[in-house]
Image: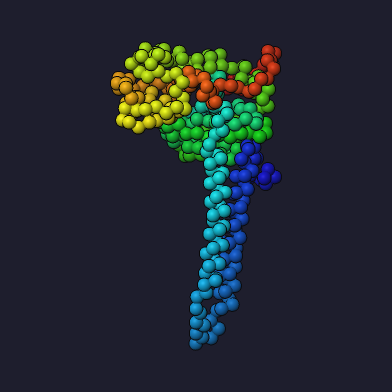
Amino acid sequence: MGGIPLFPEAASSFASEVDALYLFIVAVSAFFTVAVSAAVVFFAFRYRRKHPEEIGAHIEGSLPLELLWSVIPTIIAMVMFAWGAKLFYEMRRAPAESMQIYAVGKQWMWKFQHTGGQREINELHVPVGRPIKVLVTSEDVLHDLYFPSFRTKIDAIPGRYQTLWFEATKPGRYHIFCAEYCGTKHSGMIGTVIVMEPQQYQDWLAGGGSEGTMAERGAKLFNDLACNTCHLDSGQGRGPSLKDIIGKPVELAGGQTAVVDEAYLRESILNSQAKIVKGFTPLMPTFQGLVSEEGLAALIEHIKSLSPQAAASTPAPVPAAAPSTSTPAAPAQGARR
Ligand code: CUA
């Protein structure tokens, strides 16, 4: 597809399939548009009234014909549906071994945070050939994180985490757009995703994160906000223990259960009364407005680090690259905060 002008390069694992489905739908639509238009014009001439007194022939319906033009379109529509549904599920379910990145949309910029602690604005560095899961939210209004070359996007909704994932297939620099009108500088809310070879990415990682990993920053915040005074590891505190809870069901006071994931933790911090763990009193204050999106993400990473065996999406940078001490992680140094 890269050869077609105006068509973005295809640089993710599912890009070519998205293009194939897109072309299939366009081709089917174009075929029938042309066929129906041609038939309309042809019949208008062929069967036009030739004498003022002419009366049209009486035509009975035809069952085989009715069946034919009901069944064929149904099959074609079902192919589109099944293909689309399969691709949709593929694109919506991040593989368990994905590397996680946090993204926050804000009028008018994209802020990215790596679990290793590196932060970027309007730039995102990722390794090639590795599934990347991006947890997306917004600090103000609706935005939409869009990677045209990866053929994927997701709304950034204030107060909620949305997930998008991709696996970049070739190193390079690709566009990041905001695909939801969000105010006067919406069109300027753009950035670049830089896909690097694993070794290069490793070097880039080594050049940042001086404030510690997200989990470390989260641990500090956990103490600063005095979360540690109630959430004791022993489970004897006023709040439930946060050890080994990720991915597990938890029984709530109302009798329902909830599975602990990022969205659950987010809600429990910001709107602490929403879900009370069975056996505990709703004592926890709400932290709405007291923690930034970055702080919240750090707290979540800290809590996730307390569940080591569920660490699927936690730090684990790129597999065993030889330790490089010499290479400076040049490019985006300046873009970090
Ligand atoms: Cu943000 Cu448009």
Q: How is the image coloured?
A: rainbow
The structure residue drawn at horizontal position 65% and vertical position 22%, both measured from the top left corner, is: 319
Quarter assignment of residue 287: top left
**Front residue of 122 and 159:** 159
Q: Could one spot residue 195 in this view of the protein?
A: no
Which image quadrant: the N terminus?
A: top right
Q: How many marks?
A: 0
Q: Residue at x 56, y 16 (%)?
A: 209
Report the residue at 44% width, 18% height from top.
Answer: 243
x 53%, y 14%: residue = 212
**Residue 270 coordinates in the image, percent (x, y):** 37, 25
Residue 210 drawn at (x, y percent): 56, 13
Name of the residue lying farthest toward the bottom: 53
Q: Is residue 211 visible?
A: yes
Q: Is residue 31 left or right of residue 288?
A: right
Q: Tell me where residue 326 appears, x and y as whole percent.
A: 70, 13
Q: Name the spot of residue 211 as percent of width and height, x first.
A: 53, 14
- Front-lying residue, 186 or 106: 106
Quadrant hosting residue 293: top left
Residue 122's place in the image compared with 38, above or below, is above
Whether 240 is drawn above or below 48: the answer is above
Q: Quadrant of residue 337?
A: top right
